[in-house]
Image (tube, rainbow, N blue to C red):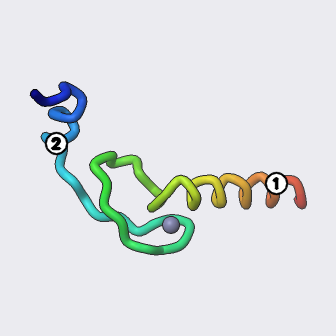
Amino acid sequence: MTHPAAALRAMRPVKSYACAQCGREFTASDERARYCSNRCRQAAKYARLKAEKDR
Ligand SMILES: [Zn+2]
């Protein structure tokens, strides 16, 4: 028995991207994916907030 959401995810093509934060290559099925991990996503978000604050 397969979970419907898992089946949908399996149908999506997995592509490889370069992380916008650390530059590391990672694969994701989400075409909007920009970061290799939550850690990088948070780091990028924090860096942007900090940059705006320093302005
Ligand atoms: Zn990364």
Q: Secondary structure at mark 2?
A: helix
Name the residue type under label 1: Glu
What is the crowding at mark 2: few (fewer than 14 residues within 10 Å), some, or many (at least 20)?
few
Q: Are marks 1 and 2 in contact (CB under 8 Å)?
A: no
Q: State whether label 1 is within 8 Å of ligand 1.
A: no
> Could you tell me residue 16's position as x and y percent?
29, 64
Point 22% across, 39% down: residue: 9
What residue lies at 80% left-to-right and 60% top-to-bottom? 51
- Label ID, residue 10: 2
Image x and y of residue 42, in percent: 63, 53
Q: Which mark is residue 52?
A: 1
Vertical order, 2 against 41 (above or below): above
Seen in the image, is 55 located left or right of residue 45?
A: right
CA separation in Å, label 1 and label 2: 39 Å
Single out the mark in the foreground, 1 or 2: 2
**Residue farthest toward the right in the current orientation of the protein:** 54
Q: Residue furthest left?
A: 1
Q: Quadrant of residue 55?
A: bottom right
